Amino acid sequence: MAPLYDIAVVGYGPTGLTAASLLGRLGHRVVVCERWPGLYGLPRLTHIDDETARTVQAAGDVDEALRDSSMCEYVWVNGKGENLVNIPANPDGPMGYPDHISMYQPDVESAIDRRLRGYGTVDVRQGWAVTGLDQDDDGVRLRLRGWNADALCADGQHDSVRARYVIAADGSRSGIRELLGVERRDFGFNEQWVNVDAEWLRPQPPEFACGTQYCDPARGHMTINIGATRQRFEFALLPGETREEMTTPKSAWRLLREYHDLGPEDVRIIRQLVYGFEARIATRWRAGRVFLAGDAAHTMPPYLGQGACSGLRDATNIAWKLHLVLRGLAPDALLDTYESERRPHVTALTHAAIGLGKVANTHDTEAAAARDAAFFAGKVPPPPPFPPLSGGVLRKEAGTPVGTLTPQGRIRLADGRTGRLDDLTGYGFTLVTAGDPTDALGPERLARLERLGCAVVALDTVDDLDGRHREYLHLLGAVAYLARPDFVLFGTAADTAGLGALVDDLDAALSATVGAAV
């Protein structure tokens, strides 16, 4: 009989890597099934935000992962090159990173891969395709077959693995989703763009050290830096242009010369392909013991830069919940909150990305002129802030930002260790208090927090080097806040007397059947 793992992760892109690493870090036996024999090695995603960087920090060596990254501002211009809107980047976002980061995906994947292989609890099975699955009350058996990378088919030897739960992070064409018979809702946004990634043969010109969206009705196009040495160029396909035509080197050089006056003396092309911008969300994200994550669960146009970020949010949301269920610290019903929390959030971002895409890629010249006039007149409202979580594992509080993200600053512990908060507290719940909570909580509640793996940080015993956590407590009007492992604010205590109730409410939220998937 196949060995029993705690979790099987199908797919080894950013979402699968992150999920496997977080669960391995928490001590679980994880098997990864990936059909390709190695890491992809080329940049598909180029942008992450500070929340995602913090997730990478939890899953790998973030300094290694972001070694060839840079802060990235965004500029939207019209077909005449006139500025429509600037989206500045904050060099020190609340998570301790710039809030817009241009990065090189292979560095991120390698850093997480290296970290998880060191845990000793994660088996990475590359070169194996999942061809079937069977579920029962105790687990899932995945049927595997060796993947032929040359013929692009599974025609090798047979094998199988068994796990208590499965995370399917196998991309937008998810084979697991198909095996489960899960449909996707199509939001009706479908565009074809040609992607040209290039490496600079000379110092990157300053005008390319940011992301620029060209809202040109003749042909929408954009460019974004990939760190400091590489560049992505994207061009919308026009009617009559075919995939075959637009993936030839001749077409790439024609577009680069026409739109950016660049040639072989300036850049070396490292990747060229046509791909589709789409907006689709799976109708359900859980089927028994199997969970869809990342592109397998949802895809969105890239105009908001949140596709990969959303996948990593999936990974960190489901990982800590699986951990508690597998350790017997919460019922299986807790896992239903994965979809009920994540679906509304990703749906809101998908609609925002679609809206931006319609603004950016307007082909009607009169409509584009009206759009430009609205921007110039200041009549275009800024995009709304990202939505908070509104249900699931959250305390019901009035007047506090429960469901939003908590910050990360640098601290120095009493023993002299200095670093980012999460590096010193670990991947888990964190209770941050103004003063020592020992007496207010008592031994029983402290023991409960310890069983949950909750770190307790009393700011009167550590140096809050950036002042970020004391400032956050002041903003909350509280003496303590409790953050979930995915950095989400669970709840607050307005005074010392309220600390016990805060811990009790966390226990109740984890123990209850806290909501079904929607």
Image (cartoon, rainbow, N blue to C red):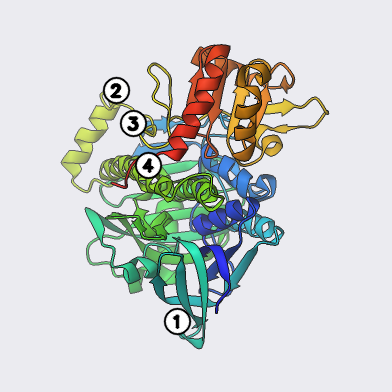
Q: Which residue is mark 2?
A: 378
User: Which x, y percent locates residue 399?
Assistant: 39, 16
Circle 4 residue: 513
Asked if the residues shown at circle 4 and circle 1 are in contact, with their CB atoms under 8 angstroms apart, the answer is no
Quote the CA–CA distance across marks 1 and 3: 42 Å
Whichever of callouts 1 and 3 sits on the residue coming sooner in the sequence is 1
Distance from the alpha carbon under mark 4 to that under mark 2 = 47 Å
Where residue 15 sits: x, y (%)?
50, 55
Q: Residues within 10 Å of mark 2 (few under 14, many from 20)?
A: few
Q: CA distance from mark 3 to mark 2?
A: 13 Å
Q: Determine the CA span between mark 4 and mark 1.
A: 44 Å
Q: Residue furthest front?
A: 444
Image point (50%, 21%), residue name: 501
Q: Quadrant of residue 512?
A: top left
| CA gap, disc 4 and disc 3 | 35 Å
Is label 4 or label 3 in front?
Answer: 4
Question: Looking at the image, which residue is at 32% across and 41% down?
Answer: 344
Mark closest to the chain's N terminus, 3 or 2? 2
Q: Which mark is residue 152?
A: 1
Q: Amino acid at mark 2?
A: Gly
User: Residue 383: which disc?
Assistant: 3
In this rendering, the label closer to the viewer, 4 or 1: 4
Does dot 4 land on a helix, a strand or a loop?
A: loop
Q: Work out whether 284 lies above or below 371.
A: below
Label 4 neighbour load within 10 Å: few <14, some 14-19, many 20+:
some
Q: Is residue 18 left or right of residue 352?
A: right
